[in-house]
Amino acid sequence: MKKLSGGQLQDEFLKNIWLQRLPSQIQAVLSVSLETLDKLAEIADKVADVTVPTAVYSAKSAPEPYPSAEIQELAKQIVELKLQISRMSRPRN
């Protein structure tokens, strides 16, 4: 970038643009350094060589078989309660 600018841009401006385009872990390392742009580029290369790229993984659990054992148990209890209510509400002879 420095060569492409033909010396028209200040180092601080180039540094800011360049840092914004780097991965966040490299930005964190370089942001505390007061080195020249050339030295920062060397450091960035070394950090990139030793860091593992971050990856995003996603996991999706298998859906629970429907109805689950808990729901089946609740359904049985509801049926039993309905039977009890039905017996209680029948007219007595």
Image (tube, grey):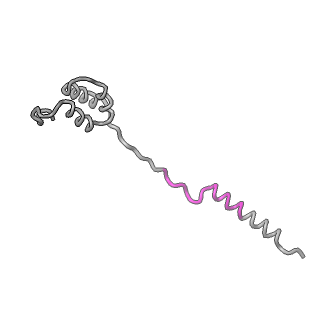
- The foreground one among 8 and 51 is 8
- The foreground one among 66 and 35 is 35
**In this picture, residue 26 sits left or right of residue 83:** left
Image x and y of residue 92, in percent: 88, 74
Say which quarter of the image contains residue 69. bottom right
Magenta highlight on residue 66? yes
Image x and y of residue 30, in percent: 28, 28
**In this picture, residue 76 sits left or right of residue 59:** right
Q: Quadrant of the N terminus?
A: top left
| Residue at (46% x, 50% y) in the render | 60
- The foreground one among 14 and 71 is 14
Say which quarter of the image contains residue 39. top left
Q: Quadrant of the C terminus?
A: bottom right
What stretch of residues is rendered in magenta?
A: 61-78
Magenta highlight on residue 79? no
| Residue at (35% x, 41% y) in the render | 55
| Residue at (79% x, 65% y) in the render | 84
Say which quarter of the image contains residue 56. top left
